[in-house]
């Protein structure tokens, strides 16, 4: 509906005012406007518009009637809030909801390891991806007080619980030549880190570039706990931390396949040799002759499930409480020393050092606490990985993961070349070198898995102990190499 009407010349302010209500002809102007809007309200057709031709030189005034700007602004606000992460479904102040989401993500991570996809990705990576998706889809907040609690208290608490088996004297006595091969592998990882950092451009990461390189060096000497400890000490951003975890998990799957391919021509050991080696190990390890072989294995999800179904209904509550109390005590000591001497970012490295020291000085009681402590540590670490994902930005992860993956590829390739080259030069068996490399890159659990699968029974316990030794030293090596070398490259 087109309405055109003429108005007398308005006041001099008309060119600057769309509706010159205070002009000299205000009564005529107001009556014309009122008549126009009354006609519009009475018209039932939806597509009608009122066009008022504004008077400039011709005595007509027109405009298009639209929604008031205040309503447009309100509508825009509503739409943006529906898709904005600033107002998630579970707000940052909803502490019960946030903790529920974190532990649910951890539980799903554990459950996923029973599936083919989950076992290929690993439980920690699944928990991280669930947290990342939930945060970026607006289900949980990207920042919450619960996350700070996890980073400040639960993460340090998990570190000593994972190191109750780290008796350095026992490792040195029991691993033999495998320990030397493992040390060669650690040197190979260090060389690979320097070469990869020099060759792979990661300038887009800014200051996080050398920090994530140091964390991945610790990861490929020890394990995931060292990766986390170094990243936390160096204050790596959550998105880069998540991208590094994702890239590393994918590459490790490829690398372990490569190790099995290299080991395809090595036959399994005879039963007699394996039995003699196991008896020899228990005989030369004081204070551990009564420990069954299974108790030496790092705790895994499937082991925990099997133990719960085969043993009695009694849970080791006393050992669990004692392990947590001891871990709190170690963390308190580490926190006191770092504050007293003003050591910035030294909490986790110092806690690691104290845990290794007491486990070496008092091996028997700490071995008794190790299974319960590792069970608690698994839960806490899984929650931590969910927090890492929730704190990350999915687009930053996508943008940074390729460069980190390329870095890991060069790093691990150099590691494999150096350990095989130096190992052959010094006369090491290929079997020994492959288990040592597996313990470096994957940790004690994957080394144990490879030795068991290939039937190399004599390598199971030394491989586990070498991996534990790596966890004990990797945080210091990665942190030191990062701050003293990588930072200035």
Image (cartoon, grey):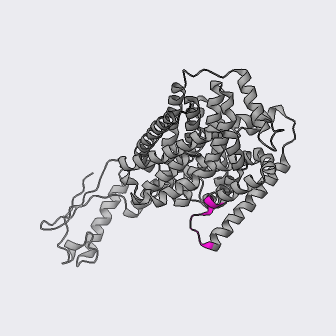
Q: Is residue 112 visible?
A: no
| Image: magenta residue range | 341-350
Residue under the image location 55 percent in, 47 percent down: 219
- Let me know if residue 63 is in the magenta part: no
Query: Which picture quadrant has residue 276?
Result: top right
Q: Is residue 268 above or below residue 292?
A: above
Q: Is residue 40 above or below residue 281?
A: below
Q: Is residue 423 visible?
A: yes
Q: How many marks?
A: 0
Residue under the image location 73 percent in, 30 percent down: 277
Percent coordinates x, y for residue 158 in the rendering = 68, 53
Q: Considering depth in this image, is 287 or 77 the residue closer to the camera?
A: 287
Percent coordinates x, y for residue 439 in the rendering = 59, 39
In the visual, does 19 lie left or right of 409?
A: left
Q: Considering depth in this image, is 375 or 343 the residue closer to the camera?
A: 343
In the visual, does 145 lie left or right of 203?
A: right
Percent coordinates x, y for residue 412 in the rendering = 47, 40
Q: Considering depth in this image, is 110 or 261 the residue closer to the camera?
A: 261
- Let me know if residue 344 is in the magenta part: yes
> Outermost residue, left direction?
57
Residue under the image location 62 percent in, 38 percent down: 177
Percent coordinates x, y for residue 349 in the rendering = 61, 59
In the visual, does 301 lie left or right of 389?
A: right
Q: Is residue 371 above or below residue 332?
A: above
On-image quarter of the C terminus: bottom left
Q: Considering depth in this image, is 114 or 407 the residue closer to the camera?
A: 407
In the visual, does 257 lie left or right of 458?
A: left
Residue under the image location 40 percent in, 47 percent down: 195
């Amino acid at each position: 509906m087109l309405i055109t009407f003429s108005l007398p010349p308005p006041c001099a302010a008309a060119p600057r005012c769309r509706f010159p209500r205070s002009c000299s002809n205000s009564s005529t102007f107001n009556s014309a406007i009122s008549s126009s809007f009354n006609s519009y309200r009475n018209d039932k057709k939806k597509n009608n518009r009122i066009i008022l031709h504004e008077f400039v030189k011709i005595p007509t005034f027109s405009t298009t009637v639209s929604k008031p700007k205040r309503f447009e602004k309100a509508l825009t606000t509503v739409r943006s809030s529906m898709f904005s992460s600033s107002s998630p479904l579970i707000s940052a102040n909803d502490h019960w909801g946030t903790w529920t989401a974190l532990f649910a993500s951890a539980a799903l991570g554990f459950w996923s390891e029973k599936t083919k996809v989950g076992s290929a990705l690993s439980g920690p990576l699944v928990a991280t991806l669930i947290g990342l998706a939930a945060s970026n889809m607006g289900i949980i907040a990207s920042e919450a007080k619960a996350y700070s609690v996890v980073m400040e208290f639960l993460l340090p608490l998990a570190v000593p619980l994972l190191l109750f088996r780290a008796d350095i004297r026992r490792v040195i006595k029991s691993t033999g030549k495998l320990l030397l091969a493992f040390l060669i592998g650690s040197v190979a990882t260090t060389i690979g880190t320097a070469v990869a950092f020099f060759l792979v451009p990661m300038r887009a990461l800014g200051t996080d570039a050398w920090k994530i390189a140091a964390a991945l060096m610790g990861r490929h000497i020890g394990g995931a706990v060292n990766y986390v400890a170094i990243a936390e000490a160096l204050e790596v951003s959550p998105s880069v931390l998540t991208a590094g975890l994702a890239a590393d998990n994918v590459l490790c799957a490829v690398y372990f396949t490569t190790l099995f391919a290299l080991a395809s021509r090595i036959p399994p050991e005879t039963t007699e040799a394996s039995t003699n080696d196991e008896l020899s190990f228990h005989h030369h390890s004081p204070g551990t002759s009564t420990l069954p072989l299974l108790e030496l294995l790092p705790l895994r999800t499937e082991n925990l499930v099997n133990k719960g179904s085969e043993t009695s209904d009694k849970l080791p509550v006393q050992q669990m409480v004692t392990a947590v109390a001891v871990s709190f005590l170690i963390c308190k000591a580490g926190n006191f020393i770092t504050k007293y001497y003003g050591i910035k970012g030294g909490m986790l490295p110092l806690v690691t050092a104290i845990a290794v020291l007491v486990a070496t000085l008092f091996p028997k009681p700490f071995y008794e606490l190790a299974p319960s402590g590792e069970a608690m540590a698994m839960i806490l670490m899984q929650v931590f990985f969910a927090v890492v994902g929730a704190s990350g930005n999915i687009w930053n992860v996508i943008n940074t993961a390729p460069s980190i993956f390329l870095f890991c590829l060069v790093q691990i390739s150099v590691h494999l070349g150096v350990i095989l080259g130096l190992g052959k030069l010094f006369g090491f068996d290929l079997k020994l070198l492959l288990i040592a490399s597996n313990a470096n890159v994957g940790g004690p659990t994957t080394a144990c898995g490879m030795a068991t699968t290939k039937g190399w029974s004599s390598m199971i316990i030394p491989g586990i102990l070498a991996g534990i030794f790596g966890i004990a030293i990797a945080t210091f090596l990665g942190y030191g190499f990062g701050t003293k070398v990588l930072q200035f490259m």
